[in-house]
Image (cartoon, grey):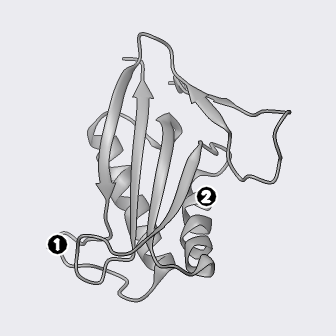
Amino acid sequence: MPSAVTLIRSSSLSDVAEYAYAATAPAEARLIFLAGSCPLDADGATVGIGDYAAQAAACVETLTTALGDAGASLEDVLTTRVLVASSRQVDLVTAWEVVRDAFGDHDVPSTLLGVAALGYDHQLVEIEATAAVVD
């Protein structure tokens, strides 16, 4: 089934950004608001302790599972917010590259933020998302 999401790339803005600047969904779309996807295993333990890339990959896995449970996939995502517990740009970029690669050509509008701390012990990365599907 084709995605309800249309990505908008602006020729008036810089092409340096590795994502579309906007996204739309038709009025009849069902919106899916996802809680922040965390790098937790099935027992609730934080995985990839100390490893930004491993935690970002675990967050993408969690996000993909939650999307599937809601009847959607990564291609249905409208926007993401990637939270990284670090003030170092290199750590933010490490996490971002994992998320960017997971989305491939579906380069949704995204915000990358460095934050002071996240909710679970040893947590370094969290991904929030909104998706849209037409049932």
First-in-chain label (2 vs 1)? 1
Q: Residue furthest top?
A: 28
Could you tell me if the residues under marks 2 and 1 are in contact, i.e. CB atoms within 8 Å? no
Residue 26 percent across, percent down from the top left: 50, 14
Residue at (41% x, 38% y) in the render: 130
Quarter holding residue 16: bottom right
**Gap between marks 2 and 1, in whole Å?**
25 Å
15 left or right of 39? right
Observer-nearest of 26 and 86: 86
Residue 75 percent across, percent down from the top left: 53, 38
**Secondary structure type for disc 2:** helix
> Quadrant where the C terminus lies?
top left
Task: Return the residue at label 2.
Answer: 100
Tell me, for residue 30, which label it has, or none. Answer: none
Q: Amino acid at mark 2?
A: Arg
Quarter holding residue 54: bottom left
Task: Return the residue at label 1.
Answer: 44
Residue 71 percent across, percent down from the top left: 32, 33
